Amino acid sequence: MNIAPTPLGAALLLAPTLALANGRFPASTQLVFHPTDPQQILIRVTFGLLLSNDGGKSFSWVCEKAVGYGGIQDPAVALTSDGSLLVAAFEGLATSHDRGCSFAFVQEAAKEFVIDVATDRKNPSSAGAITSTGKGNLTFNV
C-alpha cells in the first residue's frame, strides 16, 4: 500500500516548533568562570546548569531538580577556588563539592530565600550570600 504525503501533512512536518524550558524559551542567564582555573566554566540556563572543565569545548548538564530548585527561578550561582558550586535559590543555598554530582543545602540558610551569592575576589575559597525572608505586612529580613 502506497501512502502519498499530503501538502498539509508536509507543512506540519516542516513547520518550526518552539522549544521551551519550564515554560520559557531556553536561554543562558549567567556566566561564571572559576576564580583560578579559566578552563572551568559554569553557565546558569533556564533549565539548570551547564558545566565545562575544558574551557567550553564540552559541557555537562545538571538539571534544576538535581540541585534542589524548580519553577521559573534564575538563581545566582558562584564557583569557589576549591571547585565548589553555590546556587542561591528560594529553597536555600545549595552547594556541591563534587562538580555538580550531588548537592546539599547549607543549614545556616535553612528557611531563608537566598537571593544572591558571590565568590570573594580577595579570598576565592570563600563566598558570601544574601538572604531575604518575609516577616509579613510586606516587610523583609535581609
Image: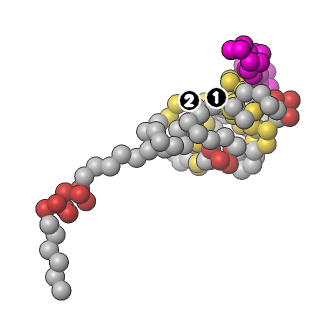
What percent of the width, then of the height, locates residue 29? 52, 31
Q: Which amino acid does label 2 sit on?
A: Gln
Residue at numbered disc 2: 30
Residue at the (19%, 57%) spot, across then down? 11
- State yes or no: residue 133 in magenta: yes
Task: Give the foreground label among 1 and 2.
Answer: 1
In this picture, which residue range is highlighted in magenta? Answer: 121-142
Q: Residue 45 lies in what quarter of the image? A: top right
Residue at numbered disc 1: 76
Colouring style: secondary structure
Q: Residue 114 lies in what quarter of the image? A: top right
Answer yes or no: do the residues labelled 1 and 2 have beta carbons within 8 Å?
yes
Q: Which of 95 and 51 is in front in this view?
A: 95
Eyeballing the image, is 49 above or below 76? below
User: Horizontal placement of 60 versus 14: left or right?
Assistant: right
- State yes or no: residue 138 in magenta: yes
Eyeballing the image, is 102 above or below 87? below
User: Horizontal placement of 4 versus 33: left or right?
Assistant: left
What percent of the width, then of the height, locates residue 55? 56, 39
Q: Which of 38 and 90 is in front in this view?
A: 90
What percent of the width, then of the height, locates residue 85? 71, 37
Residue at the (61%, 47%) spot, across then down? 63
Q: In which quarter of the image is the N terminus?
A: bottom left
Going from N to C along the chain, the mark reached first, 1 or 2, is 2
Q: Is residue 100 visible?
A: yes
